[in-house]
Every structure is written in C-alpha cells, then in structure tokens.
Amino acid sequence: TQLLEQSPQFLSIQEGENLTVYCNSSSVFSSLQWYRQEPGEGPVLLVTVVTGGEVKKLKRLTFQFGDARKDSSLHITAAQPGDTGLYLCAGPRSNDYKLSFGAGTTVTVRA
Amino acid sequence: DAGITQSPRYKITETGRQVTLMCHQTWSHSYMFWYRQDLGHGLRLIYYSAAADITDKGEVPDGYVVSRSKTENFPLTLESATRSQTSVYFCASLGGDFIRDTQYFGPGTRLTVL
C-alpha cells in the first residue's frame, strides 16, 4: 500500500486548460515535495512545502499543503505541452531524509 | 562534468548473474540513495548512505548489496539477478538539510533481467 496516494493516475488535456493533481495520505508529513520527471531522465524537484496551509507558486504552477499536513495539490494554469511529464509527490517517512514517493500522475498536454 | 552520473544507462543480463550499477556524484554530498522505479509503484528506496562507510536498508533491500568506500561513489550490486529485479534504477544525493536542500537524481539505469 502506498503511503502517499496520487490521483488521477493519468491526465490528458488540451493546451490552455487547467489541471489539478492530488497527493493524499492518512499520515502527517513534516514536509512534502513535488517532482517532475521526463522520459529517460531522473525526477527533478519542483518545490518543497513545509507549513500546513502553505501555498507556493512557481510561474503557472501552484502548490498547496493541506492544513493538517496530510495532503497536497498541484494546480497548473493554462497548461502547455512543455508541462507534459510524470508528477511525483514525496515526503519523509519519518522526520528524516528518507523519502516515500507516490506512484505518480502522468500528465499529457496536447498542442 | 559536475553532477550525478550513473553507468551503465542500459543493461541486459540473465537470471543468476551478478550485476553492479555505478553511481558517482561530484558535489561531495553526504547522503546518497538508490531507488527502483516500477509502473504503479513510484520510486521505492532500496538502500541509502549517510556518509562513507555508513549504509542502511530502505523499503526493498532484499537481493541487493551496497558499499560506500568513497564519498562520491555508491555502487549497487545485484548478487544473483532475478526477473523481478527488472526495473529502472535511480541514484540520488542530498547535501544536508533534508527539508531545505534538494535531492538530486541521476539519469537512471534501465536493467532487464532475462
């Protein structure tokens, strides 16, 4: 059983549309990270959220950490083909540096 | 080149053979990790290391061995490869503060066990 559940598993949208990816857990996390992975490459860190209720923006990407620190979401506004990739959330299994990853959401943005 | 590299990038082997995957980082990061990535499971931690000569098991360590005699290298050995070890393997390193710092991943090694 995944410690972190991501939904949806797959998402295909048209360029210009908005999308939201969810990351949920029954456990409390001290922090959550979001990564993007492109085919044939390793994951690349997008953001780390630390405080419950925190919202971080990275250009057209908005990341939110739930008040109870059990969930997070990634919202992309006006998606572009360059946003295509596998989005992974991850959090420390305990209060240390070992990460537990969700299974990922594959996002495809069609031109 | 600066960064984290893995070799080989692709490997095909047979059941029962020993295989070693190499990982090298140029930042002198203390922490290094090995993950495997399989469809539907995301990344799962195999082994990790907090410093040279300090290693410990992750979620799925069975069938794997690691060593870390030098800070910059963290090889992963499959002692007797099995088909269930067919996967994409990623090495990663982390400088220090696990919240504020970034875990950097290598490009991966795609391993096929026949």
Image: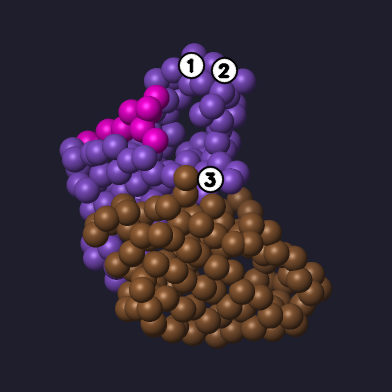
Chain colours: A brown, B purple
Q: Residue at left 51%, top 36%? A: B8
Examine the rendered structure and indicate whether residue A56 appears above or below residue A95: below
- Is A11 on the left or on the right of A25, as rendered? right
Examine the rendered structure and indicate whether residue B67 appears above or below residue A18: above
Residue at the spot of label 3: B41
The label nearer to you, 2 versus 3, is 3
Secondary-structure class at tag 2:
loop
**What is the x, y in percent for residue B70?**
23, 41
Tag 1, which chain? B
Highlighted magenta segment, given as a residue range: B60-70
Q: Residue at left 47%, top 67%? A: A34
Front-lying residue, B43 or A9: A9
Residue at the spot of label 2: B14
Image quadrant assignment for residue B57: top left
Residue at the spot of label 1: B17
Q: For the residues labelled 2 and 1, say whether their Cβ atoms are less than 8 Å apart.
A: yes
Q: Residue at left 66%, top 75%? A: A19
Q: Residues within 10 Å of mark 2 (few under 14, many from 20)?
A: some
Q: Main secondary structure of the magenta part?
A: loop
The label nearer to you, 1 versus 3, is 3
Q: Which mark is residue B44?
A: none
